[in-house]
Image (cartoon, rainbow, N blue to C red):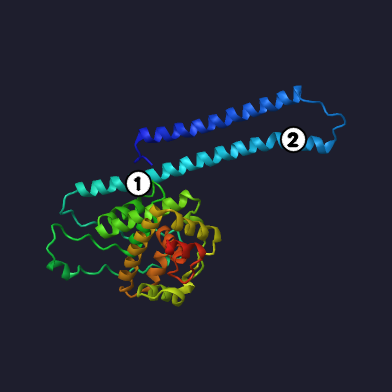
Amino acid sequence: MNSLDPLRRLAIEQARGRVLAVGAASSLAWLALAGLFALFGPESEGTGAAGWLLWLVGLFLPLALIWLAVWAARSLLALRQEAEELRAMLARMQDEDAAAEPMAEPRPVAAAPAPAPAARRNAIPAPPRPAADTRQATLELDSPAAAELTPTELFYALNFPDGPEDREAIRCLRLALADPGMARLIRAAQDVVTLLAGQGVYMDELALAEADPALWRRFAEGARGEAVAALAVIRDEAALATAGTMLRADEVFRDVAHHFLRHFDRLLSRKAQDGDPQLLAVLAETRSGRAFTLLAQVTGMLGQAGAEAEAAEGS
């Protein structure tokens, strides 16, 4: 992305280059040490095939470990760069929106929304845009309220852009950030997704089983625990254990996670009043929705709290 400070991007690229250089230097040093040992070490008479195999394993195993560490370090730096780029994009959009004129022209409605990547995104209802809520006229506000997002726009905003070329998602994200409440939700979701990714839990890799949309309505109306246990559709034990450990051991993540859970829960409660539970199920498929489902399972909101979640809640 072009939104990251070029100096910061250069520093990260230089760090990745240094990691690569350290790996190469370590490999050469190990090969030199192994060569000296082969030349000047004690000679073994009658070394068989098993001895040579053991020697080769001893030679190449450290090299494999060195380059595994190099790959892990470079991947972590790349992840950090992606997280900072997304933060920079969000900050830039917020600054641009703040600098815009208060009375902006009404945005045009797209003739046909772009197709959604998820399998069930086509199920997003597309009713006519509702008329403006006349109750807003009684509130003494300095500027008019942000326009209500369509279901498709809300999906794109909660799913985050895939990159600077994902213009439709960026447009929808900009619209969401214009609303203070949605902006808080988006920032909290981005923090949770980034922190989970830092521990190897990626939302795109979480498989979601089919869930009854009517259960999402019940959840949005206040049902918790075993009453909505069928919504606990994430079966990735490693992801659940990692999230539980982070909730228990990382105070910063715990605060961010509970802040995100509250805001996403409020969004579901508002959208449940629209009358179509299918929308709630579709929103649960976004990256933000997957993070919500994961944390809701771990904390026991869906009746699936494990040992890590119970320890996290008791801390």
- Judged from this view, the residue extending furthest toward the front is 315
Q: Quadrant of residue 36?
A: top right
State the residue position of label 1. Answer: 87
Between residues 210 and 238, which one lies in front from this camera angle?
238
Quadrant in which the N terminus is drawn: top left
Answer few, some or many: residues within 10 Å of disc 1's Cα (few below 14, many 20 plus, some between 14 and 19). Answer: some
The disc labelled 1 sits on which kind of residue?
A: Arg
Q: Tell whether 307 sits left or right of 56.
A: left
State the residue position of label 2. Answer: 56
Who comes first in sequence, dot 2 or dot 1?
Answer: 2
CB contact under 8 Å: marks 2 and 1? no
Q: Residue at x 46, y 76 (%)?
A: 226
Quadrant in which the C terminus is drawn: bottom left
Q: Quadrant of residue 182?
A: bottom left
The disc labelled 2 sits on which kind of residue?
A: Leu
Is 15 placed above or below 85 here? Answer: above
Asked which secondary structure carries label 1, the reply is helix
Task: Please provide percent x and percent y for residue 92.
Answer: 29, 45
Between residues 137 and 56, which one lies in front from this camera angle?
56
